[in-house]
Amino acid sequence: MRLSAAINSFKSSNLISWKTTGKLQQTLAGCIELSGKTLHSGKVSKVKIWPVFAGEGRYFEFHSNLIPASIDFVRESLLCTTLCKDGYKIRTVEHLLSALEAKGIDNCRIQIQSLDSEDTEVEVPFFDGSANAWVEAIEQVGRKEALDRCGNNVEKLAPHLSEPFYVSRNDSFMVAFPASKVHISCGIDFPKVPAIGCQWFSSAALDDSYEKHIACSRTFCIYEEVEHMCSMGLIKGGSLDNAIVCSATKGWLNPPLRFPDEPCRHKVLDLIGDLSLFARSGSQGFPMARVISFKGGHSLNADFVRRLSGITVQET
């Protein structure tokens, strides 16, 4: 595909221009198959990830329904990112998408199924609460140049900011500045939980540092909030084996941490997965920008991507 044709096929807001990365689109060199327990429902699900043609991007298949990994199909949900289309929901997609974006798997079909064939809602397996299992599986299978249906390679494009912008919710915010490469700074603040407190972590997150410094960081939660989350029907599959749990009075209940700032690093992991939802037709989803996030979460991340897409976001 000619580069000019590829760029012209993209529609976006005035905030974004699409430029070549100097790389070709990639897909998996083989099939990945993993199954495991899920976080919120506690059920077991199975995932198969298949290579596909260049230009097809990343998409899920659930009960023969295809759901693109796109912000257009994100629906508001608690404590995870959920894709929804035609009455079918796929929850907790962020860790898998984070690994695929960071490892450069631009095009793939993610076939997912629940053990209950009647389910219209399914979750991605949670494993140890990090993206490690997905990164290891990608490394084992490898990747290859993706070709389109005519046998041609396709340039990989990336979104570039034309000007700074921000989104906010209450005391949380995310701001992005134009840059020649990706850089993320993330901050969290838990003044009532001294063992976490205020933390900052920065990374050029889409380079080789992802696997070593970000992918292995695990989901965290506050012990005093667990009962409330359970009462809302959440974290039925949660345990000390798939999250690090911190008490406001007793500190970490299942040490050791993999990093002193592991909670903050996990926020970066989630951010990469959520911003990957800006990808289209096998492009890079995460913008070439310096992104600073403070006290962010899945809802704020989704607001950010919607703003990039030119969708009006109501700030609070």
Image (cartoon, grey):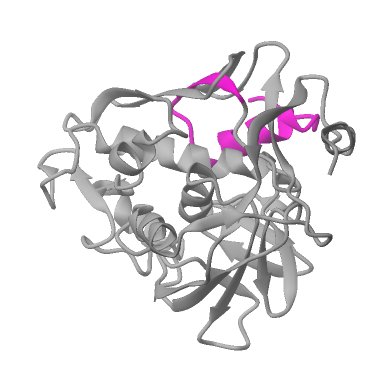
Query: Was residue 303 drawn as part of the magenta stretch in this picture?
Result: yes
Image coordinates for residue 232, horizontal then vertical, percent: 46, 60
Q: Give the side of residue 177 with respect to residue 134, left or right.
A: right
Image coordinates for residue 180, horizontal then vertical, percent: 58, 16
Q: Residue at x 49, y 56 (%)?
A: 96
Which one is nearer the viewer's eye here, 287 or 72?
A: 287
- Give the position of the C terminus as an image quadrant: top right
Image coordinates for residue 89, horizontal then vertical, percent: 65, 66
Q: Is residue 299 above or below residue 65?
A: above
Image coordinates for residue 241, horizontal then vertical, percent: 22, 62
Q: Is residue 66 above or below residue 284?
A: below
Q: Is residue 126 above or below residue 265?
A: below
- Give the position of the N terminus as an image quadrant: top right
Q: Give the side of residue 88 with respect to residue 213, left or right.
A: right
Quadrant of the rendered image containing residue 136: bottom left
Q: Residue furthest front?
A: 151
Q: Residue at x 28, y 24 (%)?
A: 199
Quadrant of the rendered image containing residue 59: bottom right
All told, the count of numbered labels is 0
Which one is nearer the viewer's eye here, 253 or 25?
A: 25
Q: Residue at x 73, y 79 (%)?
A: 64
Q: Which residues are magenta?
A: 288-316
Q: Residue at x 56, y 56 (%)?
A: 144
Report whether residue 79 is seen: no
Q: Give the side of residue 131 with respect to residue 308, left or right.
A: left
Report whether residue 301 is seen: yes
Which one is nearer the viewer's eye here, 104 or 199?
A: 104
